[in-house]
Image (spheres, helix red, strand yellow):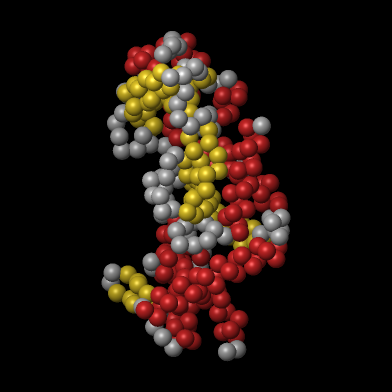
Amino acid sequence: MGKYAVDRFAAMETFVCVVEAGSFSAAARRLSVGQPAVSKTVAQLEEHLGVRLLTRSTRGLSPTEAGLHFFERARLAIQEADAAELAARGAAGSLSGRLRVSAAVSFARLHVLPALPRFLAAHPALEVDVILDDRNVDLIEEGIDVSLRMGSLGDSTMTARKISQSPRLVVATPGYLAGAGRPDSPADLLSHQVIVYLQGQRNATWTFRQGSSEASVAVHGRVRVSAAEGVRAAVLADMGLAIASAWMFAPELASGAVEPVLPDWQLPPVELWAVFPNGRLASSKARAFVDFVAAELAAARA
C-alpha cells in the first residue's frame, strides 16, 4: 500500500466531510484547503478502493451504495480516533489543530473573546476560528465544530448541551429615564419608547411575572433592530428601553451606564446552548471549549 496507507485516514476524513457538507466546495471551506485538493483526494480514494463512492450530477453529490457503507464505517473510525486521542492526552491534555466556533456577535465580544487568551494559553497548538453571526448558521455547510446559541432550540433533533442561563431585564440609561420617567408597572411600558429586538416581526409581546401575578404587554417601538449590537447602540444613545439578557449589557449594568427597570417583575431567563453538528460525536476540542465557556460564565456569576 506504500505512501497511500499513511494518508488513508486523512482521505477518510475528507470523504466524510464531503458527504456531510454536500459538495466539494463546502468541504474545502470546512477543511481550509482548495477545492481541487478535495476532489483529488476523493478520486484517489475511489481509485484505491476500486469503487465509485460518489454520484456526481448537476444537482450535487450523493453517496453511492458503496459510498454510504464506507461513509458510515469511516465516520465511526474517526469518532473512535477522536475518543482515543482524548483518552491518551487525558482531560487536561493539550489540544491541537483547528476549532471552528460560531456565536452571536455581542455575546462573543463581551464574554468569549476576552476570555479566549486563557483557553489558547492552555492549548498552544490549537487554532480557533470564531464565526460571528446573530443568525443560526448551518453548522455542516460552514464547517462549525460547535455553535453557542441563545434561546429555545427549535430543532429537537440537534445534539446540544445547555451551558448556562441569564436573567432577562428591562434596561435603560439614566439619561433616558431622566427625560421619560421610570415605569412602575409593565403597563407603563406602553407610554415609553422601546427598542424592539426581533427578526422578521414588527412588534413584541413581553410577559412579566410577580409572584402569582402575570402581565403581558405588546410593546410598539419606532426602532426595530435585528442584531444585538444595534440594540446596545440604540439604548446607549438614550433612545429608549429594551428587554435583554443581563449578558448583553453586563459591562454597563456593572458601571451604572444602564439601569434595570421594573426589578420586582420577572421575565423568563435566556438559555445558552452549545449545539454540535448532527450525526457526529462532539470532538474533544469542541467539548473542551464548551467546558471552558461554562466555567468562565460560572466564575463571572460568583
Question: Residue at coordinates 48% horizontally, 32% vertically from top-left?
Answer: 269
How far from the left and from the top, in percent, is residue 164? 55, 39
Is 287 placed above or below 14 here? Answer: above
Pick the front one: 156 or 275: 156
How far from the left and from the top, in percent, is residue 270? 48, 35
Q: Quadrant of the C terminus?
A: top right
**Residue 200 in the figure: left or right of residue 129:** left
Question: Residue at coordinates 49% horizontally, 75% vertically from top-left?
Answer: 73
**Residue 53 in the figure: left or right of residue 147:** left
Is 262 placed above or below 151 here? Answer: above
Question: Residue at coordinates 48% horizontally, 28% vertically from top-left?
Answer: 168
Q: Quadrant of the N terminus?
A: bottom right
Pick the front one: 8 or 86: 86
How far from the left and from the top, in percent, is residue 21? 42, 64
**Residue 261 in the figure: left or right of residue 99:** left
- Residue sitting farthest toward the front: 212
**Residue 215 in the figure: left or right of residue 262:** left
Can the viewer see residue 223 in this picture? no
Q: Quadrant of residue 300?
A: top right
How far from the left and from the top, in percent, is residue 291? 62, 48
Can the viewer see residue 252 in this picture? yes
Q: Number of labelled discs?
A: 0
Q: Quadrant of residue 127?
A: bottom right
Question: Residue at coordinates 28% horizontally, 69% vertically from top-left?
Answer: 59
